[in-house]
Amino acid sequence: MTKPSRLTQVERYELHDVIGSGGMATVHIGKRRGDVGFSRIVAIKRIHPHLAADLGFVEMFIDEARLASRIHHPNVVPVVDAVAHDDELLMVMEYVAGLSLAKVLKILRAEEQTMPLPITLRIMADAIEGAHAAHQAADVSGEPLELVHRDISPNNLIIGSDGVTRVLDFGIAKAIGRVHQTRTGVVKGNVGYIAPEQAVGDTVDCRTDIYALALTFWEILVGRPAFDGDTDAERIHRAMTETLPSPSQVESEVPAGLGKLVMVALERDREKRYGSALEMLEALDALSLPIASKREVAAWFQDIGAEQLEQRARQVARVELAEPVPEPSSPASNSPASKPPPTDTAPAIEADTLASMAELAPAPSRRLLLTAGVLLSLGLGAGAGWYFITNQTHQDLTSETSVSAERVDGGWETQARSPVALPSKSAVLTANAAPSTSASGTSVAAAPPTTASSAAPPRWVAPPPASKPNASRPAPDSLLGQD
């Protein structure tokens, strides 16, 4: 049964229901919100408040996230983010729809059932592969981290609804070169699954995890924990003094070869154990026992944990549909300085607003508005045109010199005249001049004498119509060279 909790927002993550708890942290169903409506369900490990003040635990927690992020394998729950914000310290992991092996074993005991051997072999093979991946993890330069989980147990093995078993929680992992070193003499891990060297505070290596895997294997095959007790001290004492029987001696259905494999991994002297998780996995394969596929594990798991899986699915659905946590309003938004100053003038109506008003108006009103707009546009255009014509005419007449054309000997000659005074714009721009006859018999406009005060403005005289060329008239090309 999961524990609902008050929704908490830490930076970009929302923390919802508590789905697990340990000595160092609680695990929440979380949600990450991003831009453009993006969201993702995650599992968030949140360190206990009373441990946040302990620098040693904080360092260990940070180390866990740093080291776990270096492991990339299908049988390991990936760490996707770490957050340190105010008094909160979070490690964000990929959410796996499933149950821990510990919960599955509890269900089987309550129903007085045992796990089928092929299912057991697949679950343990996945766990061994995940541990081997952690042991082989390397840093960015390719140097091995020599990572040891140190806390493998049924609580830290999760069976997914996809039939894949994954290792999680590297909370007390230890590796060469880590920032935080475990304090000497402090035993860390589940005391029911720790190796003898770990119990006495000796150095650990990958064979320490092999011992924990063998204890888990033994528990599944036999149906009860290897070293049980009412207190941690009792469990440690039994682990250090008692000799376990082979699983095949307790349960006759367990093959003798499989029982021997488990007992080799449970040797108190680690030098007699398998040298690596890969070696243990190869020994399991060599037994040629029937092993279930991932699809078969998924089908069996869906049947055994149907009620718990349905409950978890409802929780996830609630988280998916949950509204985002409202952001606190900024104090500046309510301050008088942030409010716009009052104004006595009416706000200007934008063109878009007028268009919207036209759209909202009834059909006859829209026609009137459109007609008025067209007439207004025509009127503005006509006014602008009239202004341009009259202004241009006035500029031409106020130029410093006036130019007239006069025909001379069959050609045209231009000459500049002196500036003249201009009448007002209201005066008629015409002048009546008596035509005179030139020596060639062509009528031209005579320029009457003018003064600066009374002279009429000159006007252009149109040239006579072109006549047919004759022998006495020079060719057009010769006219271009005359002065």
Image (cartoon, rainbow, N blue to C red):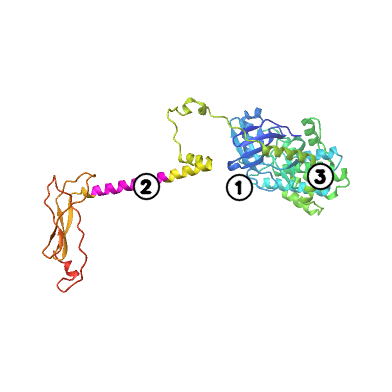
Residue 416 on image: x %, y %: 15, 54
Check disc 3: other Cα within 10 Å, few if <14, some if 14-19, many if 20+.
Answer: few
Asked which quadrant contains residue 115, the reply is: top right
- Identify residue for label 1: 143
Q: Which residues are magenta?
A: 375-395
In the depicted structure, whether residue 154 falls above or below residue 8: below
**Does the image show residue 225?**
no
Residue 198 on image: x %, y %: 72, 37
Inspect the magenta stretch and tell me whether residue 435 lies in it.
no
Residue at coordinates 19% horizontally, 53% vertically from top-left? Answer: 459
Q: Which of the numbered marks, if any, corresponds to residue 394?
A: none
Check disc 1: other Cα within 10 Å, few if <14, some if 14-19, many if 20+.
Answer: few
- Sequence-wise, the earlier of marks 2 and 1 is 1
In the depicted structure, whether residue 55 falls above or below residue 249: above
- Identify residue for label 3: 303
Residue 65 on image: x %, y %: 63, 39
Direction from residue 279 to residue 363 in the image, left or right: left
Q: Secondary structure at mark 3?
A: helix
Asked which quadrant contains residue 208, the reply is: top right
Q: Nearer the viewer, mark 1 or mark 3?
A: 3
Check disc 2: other Cα within 10 Å, few if <14, some if 14-19, many if 20+.
Answer: few
- Identify residue for label 2: 381
Residue 30 on image: x %, y %: 66, 37
Q: Secondary structure at mark 1?
A: loop
Inspect the magenta stretch and tell me whether residue 377 lies in it.
yes
**Does the image show residue 134?**
yes
